[in-house]
Image (tube, rainbow, N blue to C red):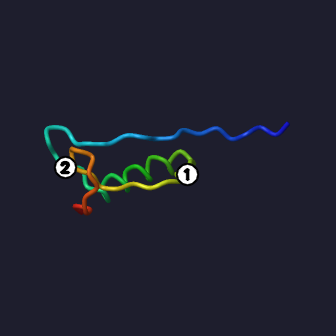
Amino acid sequence: MVKKTVGVEINGCVFGNDGKDVGHAEFWNAFIEFVEARGWYFGGGTVQIDEDGNKIEDID
């Protein structure tokens, strides 16, 4: 029997502390650096949202 690869699905939002905005590019660069530093890869996508969960144009 062939072992299946196991991973983690991510579903959530990231916001800054004290009302500070988190820019899409800033988050994406830090996230990919974290993932790749461990020899992992990410398949999926991200969008910039407001506090109500509505998609907005990237702020950075």
Q: Residues within 10 Å of mark 1 (few under 14, many from 20)?
A: few
Q: Quadrant of the N terminus?
A: top right
Residue ID at (64%, 38%) = 6
Q: In the rendered view, does 33 fall on the left or right side of 53? A: right
Residue ID at (57%, 48%) = 39
Marks 1 and 2, how far apart at CA: 26 Å
Instruction: Kindly state the secondary structure of the residue where label 1 is placed.
Output: loop
Q: In the rendered view, does 44 fall on the left or right side of 1? A: left
Residue 25 locus on image (x, y percent): 32, 59
Residue in front for this viewpoint, 8 or 38? 8
Q: Residues within 10 Å of mark 2 (few under 14, many from 20)?
A: few
Question: Which residue is at the far right?
Answer: 1
Residue in front for this viewpoint, 59 or 35? 59
Q: In the rendered view, does 30 fall on the left or right side of 53? A: right
Q: Quadrant of residue 46?
A: bottom left
Q: In the rendered image, which residue does mark 2 sit on? A: 21
Residue in front for this viewpoint, 55 or 58? 55
Q: Quadrant of residue 60?
A: bottom left
Q: In the rendered view, does 3 fall on the left or right side of 32? A: right
Residue 42 locus on image (x, y percent): 52, 51
Q: Amino acid at mark 2?
A: Asp
Instruction: Kindly state the secondary structure of the residue where label 2 is placed.
Output: loop
Question: Which residue is at the far left?
Answer: 18
Q: In the rendered image, which residue does mark 1 sit on? A: 41
Residue ID at (25%, 58%) = 56
- Disc assigned to residue 20: none
Answer yes or no: do the residues labelled 1 and 2 have beta carbons within 8 Å?
no
Q: Amino acid at mark 1?
A: Tyr
Residue 35 locus on image (x, y percent): 49, 47
